[in-house]
Amino acid sequence: MSPSPFDLTSLLGYAPATDDAYLSVVSQGPGRKIATSLGLPAPVALRRHDPDTPAVPGPVLVLGAGSGTTTTPGSDPDADALAQHLLTRGFEVHRHGDGLRRVGAVVLCLTGLTELGGLSAPALELGGLLRSLAPGGRVITISRPADGVAAGGAASLPTAADDPAAGTAAGGAPFDVVDRNAARQGVVGFLRSVAQEMRGGATANGILVADGVAATAPSVLGGLDFLLSGRSAFVDGQFLVVGSDAGPEGLATAPQGETPLDQRVVVVTGAARGIGEQIARLLHAQGARVVPVDVPAAGQPLSELANQLGTASLPLDVTAPDAGTRILEHCKTRYGRIDGIVHNAGITRDKMLANMDESRFASVLAVNTEAPLRITRQLLADPAADGLRVVGLASTSGIAGNRGQTNYAASKAGIVGMVAALAPVLAERGGTANAVAPGFIETEMTAKIPMARRQVARRLNSLQQGGLPLDVAEAIAFLLSDAAAGISGQTLRVCGQNLVGA
Amino acid sequence: MSSEPTIQPASDPTAPRQLRSAWVVAGNRTPFARAGGPYASTSVQEMFTAALDGLVARTGIAGERLGAVAGGAVLKQPKAFNLVRESVLGSALDPQTPGIDVQQACATGMETTSLIANKIRCGQIDAGVAGGVDSASDAPIVVGEGLRKVLLQLNRAKTPKDKLKALAKLRPGDLAPVAPGVAEPRTGLSMGEHQALTTAQWGITRQAQDEIAANSHHNLAAAWDSGFFDDLVTPFRGLTKDNNLRPDTSVEKLGGLSPVFGKNLETDPTMTAGNSTPLTDGASAILLATAEWAEEHNLPKLAEIVDAETAAVDFVDGNEGLLMAPAYAAPRLLARNGLKLQDIDLVEIHEAFASTVLTILAAWEDADFCKVNLGLDEPVGVLDRSRLNVRGSSLAAGHPFAATGTRVVATLSKELKARAVAENRPVTGLISVCAAGGQGAVALLRAYPES
Amino acid sequence: MTTTPNTPAPEPTPGQGQNRCAGEGESPQRIVLDTMPALGGLYAKAAAGTTARAATLGMRRAFKGLPLPVPGKGARAGSRSGRSNPRLPDVEIVVPAVEVKAPEHRAFCEVVGARIRATSTGAGSGTEVFSGYLHALAFPAAMVLLTRKDFPLPTVGLVHLANAVTQTETVLEGDLLQVNVRAENLRPHRAGTAVDVVAELRRSPDAPPIWVGRSVYLARGTRIPGAEDSRSTDSGTTTQSAAGDGTRPEFVPPVPTARWQLGADTGRKYAAVSGDVNPIHLSGPSAKALGMKGAIAHGMYTASRALALLDTSAPLTWEVEFATPLVLPGSAAVAVQRDGRGENLRSATVTVWNAKKRKPHATISVTR
């Protein structure tokens, strides 16, 4: 590898190695042999983004399900089109798995699936390829979302449910829609199971393309770029839901490059340390003009961060009644506009509900949910917030619930609800609202969990390790970028397919 | 994102130069800490660097080359002779930014403000930082004269025999360290003892002093509670707030303290630890710039440094109180700018002691003093107390000597700007800081409603 | 004129000058020393000349302010010579050419805080000598006189009550001065017996003195039956409160303008630069050995430091009265009252007192 003038690691200022000693022992060499022979979890170091290595660790195989013949080019126009786009991006693209000893990624185009039986052939073909999948490889399904599947489903697109075409399609043959819906949701279960069978740091994720949106819409291609790359290292068993054709034309020919957020003015709350700091550093590395916000009490690390990023800090308590106004004022004064905000600031005040007191409950809601709501409302009151990209921080606890975290889970689930409802509001002004739900992330906070519990918590996901703050930041950066312009109202889990609340 | 040093010739080098306006665009300080507390193991250089870094972070000028950083400390280790430049090198500023060490006792911060403002006004620089720092915890401890002489001789000695000879002169008493003097060199009286004389001379009551102290704490506490200091203070070493602040103090509580100064005078002593500033550690800095520089950097023009004046009094034989120089400086400054005390919207009088404020105010109200000492036909007059130290002052915040000046400048600038915008008119402020050696620095600041 | 040989601590020639009256118009005997003697030897001699018990007693009484009803047996005046009518020796100690050496002068100035002042006067240009230092310059000659066997008062118990200096000309470093010292005006004091020791500095034997210092000493508790009562009137250098027999008025402290912090080594530092190594100033133990509660500051240290505060130059007259001793280590309140500075100073007073006890240590007044 040639030396690079662009030292991402030092720029991001994080140590990729975690304090996960088990991971470092078993990820390679004799330790790995022992672990596998004992049937112990055998996590491997994940493939993360590096501008100097190829985005995919081998050829990309595009399989289709169009007319039931998975291997015939021309029979599945969506698969053809996707293959063409991937080719344009410079990937080595194959339409057949025959003769391939090593596969970097398999893209399974299932947009044409009308009945669940149609899944068999491509599923089995994929199965035959899994042993050839390179470490850090990818399986990505492209399919359409099922209707009316709410809680526990992969997608809940408010607009899709109201789509007249969906309900009355094929007029007079309503049961076809039922068949199709079963097939579509079947893909979800299939993919999530595939993800759990992946080895060697490989992941399986899906993209759900809303009816009426082209399978090659900018955000489908942008989503593919994200999921194929190391930027999605800790995203596993998840679905990106593309609800619109929004997004730059340029994505048809090339991914966004290293600085997709060039000159975007993005506010990051809770930026002084932990995940927030990593978010700020990554957004900065991707070209954004970051406005790091944290409570005045965290002013010292906040200042250090701001000075390293060459930006101006904004010490501010997000629960202040005028926090949004002050953020707006700062952004307008210094940059004339605001392009995005990451509501990262959050606290935990864990207690079993029986022992919970009002201040613990209320303060968690105030910081984690009420502040993002109030700030967003205040930002949207100003035309400078047109096109605003909002990213909230949810949590797997908010999705699955967590013992001792009734307050926290409520607050984080609130974020899921917030972005879902914000999406149509922001859509009118050209913006999006999404959330990221981290699972077990190696942070100062999780480092305080007692050793045994921490080791267990780490392994409770398909990748058998904790994620890094960078993994969360990568997902957030993606959702802030133009590549995700067609994705809104969604909550993307960055959890390595955490078994909790799967 | 270091800005390249550029040399641009003036458009017409022969044209007479116009004075430019110097603006306060931002301020930052560490929380102030009582000596021996959270900053006890911190050097003045670390503290000043932290204040600079906070200011740089607040304004987003990391890597910028500024025209100058001027600062200083009253209590300074000999190794810190280049304190400010060393701090700059350790900060996020471009290492090509020069540093200037200034020392004018407690008025150091006022003098650095004046220095940087004048450089800007004269066209020498476009932007610079003024500040100050002090740590009573990091005060230099000097070896006794006996040990010093032995050590010097030891240093010169060439043979072991000579060295032994030098060492043989050492006496046990020579090893005792010498703490820095807090007394005025010419009188041997501490500042508190000096002020006790002035307090007695002007007949300032205990009640009046305790009221000043209580107001200071209440005003500062209210400012903290309202988030006023969110963009003026950056936490340091785990301290997030001035730890001398006692929000719940009262005139009654203060009234229970025993006097500490003036106990051997003929009058009843009135000065207590509650109405005198404690020894304090802390650093502060402000960013000053031309209007153009501020606009280019999207920074607000909080307040203009309109003018400044320094006076000194002959206190040595008791002809004038040690801390009374501002009483002379301010009327001169006001007269030069065609202003009366009553024209000033906000007045900051540094509370070295509560009675410092009160004796200065009493002098301005005293027709004889104003006539004889200031040469004025009319007394300077009464100050509307609601305009005084509205965001608290040194009795509550503490007083790290050299850091106080720019603490006050930053606080007043922000307050003036807020009022100018709220009332949609220019708002003028006056700062008075007394200093050791019978000195006093005053400055005139003005904010405008326009951004 | 008799000349004694050059010795460090010359003993007056026996048989000469003893028991001689300083009669009117009659010249005193002149004892000429080639060089200034060292004071250490003189103190040793003074101590040897009296018993430790007597010294202890004398010192203790001296500062307890308890005059003895009758001269004690240990009191030297009566017991030494056995005479009932002691007289001052009619001698004059003369040191013809004493050089004012710059290093010694500067060291003295450093200790008392006097400014080193460059001057350019009719006497030439150079560094002006601090008036207080000139007292120290002449002091060894005075000690030669005080430690003579025929001096009627005990040296070790002497209390410095007051000092008055009139200086008419500026002295420069490097100047050669003749020192003349004589004692006069032996007189009863309410607390014992007082005597004036007069030192004169002149540029040449025939010239008028340019610096005259009159020191008033008290031998507390010593009674001299036949002392010249008639001459104990106002000497011009002593005042009623200190040297006279009037009651002392209550001391009202002025408003302080300064404070002195005097370390335990104050006496040793001044001894090193003045040569006055009297043990009562040097350390607690040495002072206690002589019956003191602790070391006390040299009176002339206090006076010189006060004079240095005023920072003025010759010609001038300065007078100091000592009241209570300043125990070391300690602090003293100081008040300066003056009508001008430098050349414009006409009169000034410096009061040094104990702020807590409200007792004066010394008052220095200067007129020019």
Image (spheres, rainbow, N blue to C red):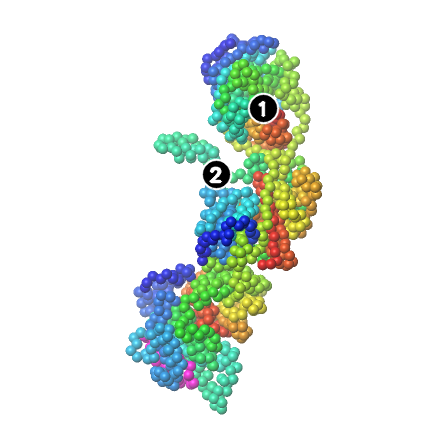
Answer whether residue A126 is magenta in the image. yes
Q: Which mark is residue B142?
A: 2
**Residue found at x 47% / y 41%:** B78
What chain is tagged by disc 1? C
In which quadrant of the rendered image does the C terminus of chain B lie? bottom right
> Which residue is painted at 48% across and 21% down in the image?
C99
Which image quarter: residue C216? top right
Q: Nearer the viewer, mark 1 or mark 2?
A: 1
Q: Characterize the magenta stretch by its predominant secondary structure.
A: helix
The residues colored magenta run A109-133
Is residue C191 shown left or right of residue C1?
Answer: right
Q: Amino acid at mark 2?
A: Val
Above or below, comparing residue A9 to residue A80 in the picture? above
Does residue C119 appear to the left or right of A191 in the view shown? right
Give the left or right position of residue C211, taking residue A484 as reference: right
Q: Nearer the viewer, residue B245 or B311?
A: B311
In the rendered image, residue B343, in percent from the top left (x then y), is placed at 67, 50
Residue A182 visible from this viewpoint: yes
> Label 1: which residue?
C315
Does dot 1 land on a helix, a strand or a loop?
A: loop
**Closer to the camera in the image, C9 or B5:** B5
Residue B310 percent coordinates (x, y):
59, 43
Frontmost residue, A21 versus B181: B181
Is label 1 on the same chain as label 2? no
User: Which residue does the image show at 63% across and 35% down from the upper left?
Assistant: B319
Q: Amino acid at mark 1?
A: Pro
Quadrant location of the N terminus of chain B?
A: bottom left
